[in-house]
Each structure stands twice: as structure tokens, then as C-alpha cells.
Amino acid sequence: MNLNNSRLREKSIVLIGFMGVGKTTIGEMVAKKLYRDFIDIDQEIEKEYNMATSEIFQNIGEKAFREKEKNVISAFSKQSLKIISVGGGAFLQEEIRKVCLEHCIVIYLDLSWESWKERISLIIDSRPVLQGRSIEEIEELFYSRKPIYSLHNSKVETDNLEACEVADYIVDSLKLAWDLHEPQ
Ligand SMILES: Nc1ncnc2c1ncn2[C@@H]1O[C@H](COP(=O)(O)OP(=O)(O)O)[C@@H](O)[C@H]1O
Ligand SMILES: O=C(O)C1=C[C@@H](OP(=O)(O)O)[C@@H](O)[C@H](O)C1
Ligand SMILES: [Mg+2]
């Protein structure tokens, strides 16, 4: 993990990666293990609109969702000691990439297309971005998003790992980085 900044231990952690890789599930586990607050940006937006993400896309539109996503992430990323899971499209916005990379530790959860395909049935109904797209179009979107996730402090290859195993790996890696950089 290539990080160099004081107060590393206090920086919030942001999980990025394509939809369905486990950012929300694993983020919640990491937060529990580190006794930190968990913030899921989609859930914060859904609370604000009192609607599911797919309804927001349908009733208010993706443009408004993206604007809200930028504002909510900008606010939380400047707070410390949080575990933040952002949506898979958040890093499409340069402002979001900048504010997260400036204030937080950004961890990229990577998953191969072959493994991700096995998970599609779990998420298809709640991801409006996937709806109405053929598997070929989804594969194209999957690879087209890769460049935005390349901007990170650390990457975790999650293939063949249970969510709890990924969470344990992240916690152990963070503790190592904190101790190496700022011995207690
Ligand atoms: N490492 C994993 N192995 C198998 N299934 C997983 C793993 N991580 C998450 N999942 C499952 O994949 C689905 C999407 O997880 P979620 O946390 O919502 O992903 P994201 O927030 O990245 O879209 C959920 O059904 C979750 O239980
Ligand atoms: O990739 C995307 O554009 C999106 C991913 C979703 O979050 P998850 O990555 O948590 O599914 C959610 O923000 C919205 O459906 C848009
Ligand atoms: Mg999520």
C-alpha cells in the first residue's frame, strides 16, 4: 500500500470498484472490525430521496443522482475515521476522484469478468445501469470502467475470496500500514 501522509490512521477509507464487487458488504464488515462508522453513499442518497436507487434513476434521473452523489461524497470524504462505500459510477466524476484521493485512503476492489458474471443474478434487479443492457454491453461497460478505478492507493484482487476474507485482508493491510507509518 503506497501511502505517504501524516495522520494516516485518521483518514477515512473509501472502497471503489464496479457494481457488485462487494463494496457495501465488505465496507460494513471492515467498519465493524475497526469500530468505525460505515457510510454507504447509495444508502445515504436513498435516505435523502426516500426512494431506492432504481426509483431515483427512474423518477428523478441519473443526472440528478450523479450531482447528489458528488455532493454527498465530497462531504463525507472530508470527515475522518469513516469507512465509505461509494457507488460503482462515482469515480466517473473527476471531482469525486480528486476529493477522495486527496482526503482518504482509496481501496479498489477488483474482480475478474468471469467471476463477476456469476454474481450478476444477485444484483441485476437493483442496478438500473444494468437494466435493458445485453451481456455483451455489460461486459463492454465493465471494461470501460477499469481506467477510472486505476486511480487508487491500494488494490485487492477479490476473485475466489469470501466477503469476510476480503474484509480481513483489508483490516490487516491497514493495520500494517498504520503501524509502519506511525508506530504507536
Ligand atoms: N466476496 C464475495 N463473494 C461472493 N459474493 C459476494 C462477495 N462480496 C459481495 N458479494 C455479494 O454480491 C452482491 C453485491 O454486493 P454489494 O456489497 O452490494 O456490492 P457493491 O456495493 O460493490 O455493488 C451481494 O449479494 C453480496 O452478498
Ligand atoms: O456503477 C454505477 O453506475 C452504479 C452503481 C451503484 O452502486 P454499487 O456499485 O454499490 O452497486 C449505484 O451507485 C448506482 O446503481 C449506479
Ligand atoms: Mg454498493
Image: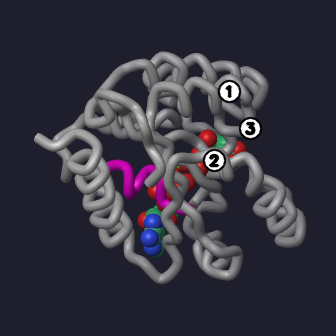
Mark identifier at residue 65? 1
Residue at 55% in and 67% down: 122
The residue stretch that appears in magenta: 21-29
Q: What element carries label 2?
A: loop
Amino acid under disc 2: Gly
Q: How far apart are marks 3 and 1 (CA)?
A: 13 Å
Side of 29 where 105 appears, left or right: right
Q: What element carries label 3?
A: helix
Name the front one of labels 2 and 3: 3
Q: Where is residue 131 in the image (x, y as percent from the top left)?
A: 77, 55
Depth check: give the residue in front, 85 or 59.
85
Mark 1, ligand 2, within 8 Å: the answer is yes
Label 1, residues with CA under 10 Å away: few <14, some 14-19, many ≥20: some
Q: Mark 3 points at which residue?
A: 92
Mark 3, ligand 2, within 8 Å: the answer is yes
Residue at 54% in and 30% down: 100
Name the front one of labels 3 and 1: 3
- Quick check: 85 above or below 159? above
Q: In the image as oriented, which residue stretches furthest toward the left? A: 184
Residue 117 falls in image quadrant: bottom right
Mark 2, ligand 2, within 8 Å: the answer is yes
Give yes or no for residue 22 being in the magenta stretch.
yes
Mark 2 vs 1, N-terminal side: 1
Give yes or no for residue 18 being in the magenta stretch.
no
Q: Position of residue 95 (x, y in %)?
A: 68, 23
Q: Distance between the residues labelled 2 and 3?
A: 9 Å
Amino acid under disc 1: Phe
Depth check: give the residue in front, 88 or 56.
88
Q: Mark 2 points at which residue?
A: 88
Q: Distance between the residues labelled 2 and 1?
A: 13 Å
Q: Position of residue 105 (x, y in %)?
A: 44, 40
